[in-house]
């Protein structure tokens, strides 16, 4: 697969340099000494890795899943080769700060680069993403003398990382986890319990794996505390680190079985048992681990990795939607079928299907969804860069509260509509689209996991309406209001964008009114009954805002010396979004004012 079928470099360059102005970050101390040439060169490396090491075995990953023989997990050897090339290029630590031997690359650029790998091979890229997020958490919250070894090993590709949250009986309700962490007397803990849905949980492609495990410390009576306040976080390596600094004795962490998924088959996903006694580190049962930070604050620490993972899931969904669109576009330009409606001569040559209006409609929809999702994810990454590099504390706070508000939107909107883009890519291919000889059917199956990964759509909806829109007295909503108002004002300066500006202004005002009305409801169940519809509407308004903001930059370029078909295509995609997508708000908001109660009042026995 060539890089131009993986991602559109013109779009990445536009989003990064023309819209998000990432070059301006080089004026800040954290990124000093960097320039556009550096960023473009790093993107070239990601693109080359995607083309040469990740894409070639994507279909093999899909056909030959990881296998567990009761002792070892076997994974396609190309996975290890690709990840070694990735680590050797220094990209595990690309965005780590310099004091952790990183490049201090802006997260916006790193995320853009990682989008190449996710589009080329999400199964293999998953190991890298989890490891980077694991290391970022340890850098932020771990004691350096305890975690530096893991971070260094991960940077060099000799250790990979996981996140161990969910349990069979708990699911997304982390207050109900039962994994225990019993103090040993030497500052360490022995963990006992089960963890479910652990991606990258067991393999032989690295010397070691460090699991970040949520568990509860029993009280003096041996009882584990209830609720989330008693949750702590622990580093639990697959192999204990010996006195020589190398992985040695096996820890008491055992793979129970592999989950067989409809997509993302290259990433081993499994159930892990901690402390079952199969291995007895230091002569005793129990998985040895060390606490990260303070007891009882584990969930707060883990939220950093969870939120990073949510944005990464959104990015993966955007990337898969995008590569599906590019494959569909290529097919539509080359597949000859039918003739224009006005052509009556049956002997006239057939035309490429892109000449048919309905095919162009489907391609436009894919472009609007995939490119819109990519912009949304990279905008979130730009906010993260502001949080870590702005010297002005109030500005950092504004970026943080806005990122917190948008995180459930980034995860859910990209996952939902990136998948719709993949569905349309299959439709453009017609009967060929659902055969395994074409890539688009795998893209759809891979992407179908993302609406569930890191919290379902419903979980994100509850988070957005129930928590994020209320936090800090509505400060995040106020910040988003200011930014949307600024875009509306600038768009009105261009005649061709004025109608879109008015549409966005009215849509956002309706969202604010509905939000206030829902917040005033005393009945929490009633307030949140249709939260999914709220998230649908909110997400579409946010993406409409970002499309309009991009259109302002694209319009300037389309009327200047750098004008190109790409810029005109950007403007057309914005027109499509406002013409076809923004009207959908009416239906979503209709069940919120007043709240439509059928789902709330429906009785179990009536089903």
Image: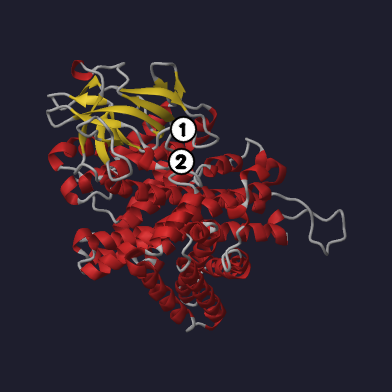
Residue to which mark 2 is pinned:
122
Q: Label 1 neighbourhood size at 10 Å, few (<14), some (14-19), many (20+)?
A: many
Q: Quadrant of residue 216?
A: top left
Whether residues under marks 2 and 1 lie with C-beta atoms below 8 angstroms apart, the answer is yes
Left or right of residue 148, residue 361 in this image: right
The image shows residue 28, relative to residue 139, as above or below, that is: below
The quadrant of the picture occupied by the C terminus is top right
Please say which color scheme the image uses.
secondary structure
Left or right of residue 542, residue 192 in this image: left
Is residue 535 visible from the viewing direction of this image? yes
Q: Alpha carbon of mark 2 to alpha carbon of mark 1: how far? A: 8 Å
**Residue drawn at the location 19% of the way across and 32% of the way down:** 220
Q: Label 2 neighbourhood size at 10 Å, few (<14), some (14-19), many (20+)?
A: many
Residue to which mark 1 is pinned:
266
Rendered location of residue 324, percent (x, y): 56, 48
- Report the front residue among 159 and 510: 510
């Amino acid at each position: 697969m060539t890089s131009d079928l993986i991602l559109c470099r013109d779009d990445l360059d536009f989003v990064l340099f023309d819209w998000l102005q990432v070059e301006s970050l080089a004026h800040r101390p954290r990124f000093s000494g960097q320039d556009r040439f550096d960023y473009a060169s790093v993107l070239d490396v990601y693109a080359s890795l995607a083309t040469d090491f990740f894409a070639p075995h994507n279909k093999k990953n899909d056909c030959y899943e990881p296998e567990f023989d009761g002792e070892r997990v076997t994974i396609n050897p190309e996975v290890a080769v690709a990840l070694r090339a990735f680590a050797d290029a220094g990209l595990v630590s690309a965005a780590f700060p310099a004091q952790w031997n990183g490049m201090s690359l802006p997260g916006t650029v790193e995320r853009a680069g990682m989008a190449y790998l996710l589009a080329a091979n999400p199964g293999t890229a998953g190991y890298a993403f989890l490891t980077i997020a694991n290391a970022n958490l340890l850098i932020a919250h771990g004691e350096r003398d305890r975690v530096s070894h893991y971070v260094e090993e991960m940077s060099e590709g000799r250790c990979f990382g996981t996140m161990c949250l969910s349990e069979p009986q708990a699911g997304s309700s982390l207050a109900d986890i039962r994994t225990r962490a019993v103090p040993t007397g030497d500052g360490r803990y022995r963990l006992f319990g089960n963890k479910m849905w652990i991606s990258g949980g067991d393999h032989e492609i690295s010397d070691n794996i460090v699991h970040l495990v949520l568990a509860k410390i029993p009280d003096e009576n041996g009882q584990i505390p209830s609720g989330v306040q008693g949750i702590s976080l622990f580093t639990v390596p697959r192999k204990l680190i010996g006195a020589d600094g190398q992985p040695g004795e096996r820890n008491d962490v055992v793979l129970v079985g592999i989950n067989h998924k409809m997509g993302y088959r290259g990433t081993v996903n499994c159930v892990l048992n901690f402390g079952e006694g199969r291995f007895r580190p230091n002569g005793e049962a129990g998985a040895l681990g060390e606490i990260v930070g303070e007891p009882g604050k584990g969930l707060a620490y883990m939220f950093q990795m969870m939120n990073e993972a949510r944005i990464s899931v959104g990015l993966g969904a955007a990337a898969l939607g995008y590569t599906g669109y590019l494959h569909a576009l290529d097919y539509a330009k080359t597949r000859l079928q039918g003739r224009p409606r006005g052509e009556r001569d049956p002997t006239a040559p057939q035309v490429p299907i892109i000449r048919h209006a309905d095919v162009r409609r489907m391609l436009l929809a894919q472009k609007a969804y995939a490119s819109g999702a990519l912009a949304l994810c990279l905008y979130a990454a730009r906010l993260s860069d502001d949080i870590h590099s702005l010297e002005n504390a109030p500005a950092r706070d504004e970026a943080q509260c806005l990122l917190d508000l948008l995180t459930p939107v980034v995860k859910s909107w990209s996952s939902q509509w990136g998948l719709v883009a993949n569905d349309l890519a299959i439709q453009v291919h017609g009967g060929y689209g659902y055969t395994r000889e074409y890539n688009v059917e795998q893209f759809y199956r891979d992407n179908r996991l993302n609406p569930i990964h890191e919290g379902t759509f419903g979980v994100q909806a509850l988070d957005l309406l129930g928590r994020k829109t209320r936090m800090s007295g509505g400060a995040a909503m106020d910040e988003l209001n200011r930014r949307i108002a600024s875009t509306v004002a600038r768009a009105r300066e261009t005649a061709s964008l004025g109608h879109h500006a008015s549409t966005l202004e009215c849509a956002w005002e309706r969202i604010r009114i509905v939000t206030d009305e829902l917040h005033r409801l005393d009945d929490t169940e009633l307030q949140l009954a249709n939260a999914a519809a709220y998230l649908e509407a909110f997400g579409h308004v946010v993406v409409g805002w970002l499309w309009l903001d991009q259109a302002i930059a694209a319009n300037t370029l389309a009327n200047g010396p750098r004008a190109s078909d790409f810029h005109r295509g950007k403007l057309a995609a914005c027109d499509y979004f406002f013409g076809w997508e923004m009207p959908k708000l009416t239906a979503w908001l209709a069940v919120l004012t007043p709240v439509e109660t059928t789902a709330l009042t429906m009785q179990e026995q009536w089903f």
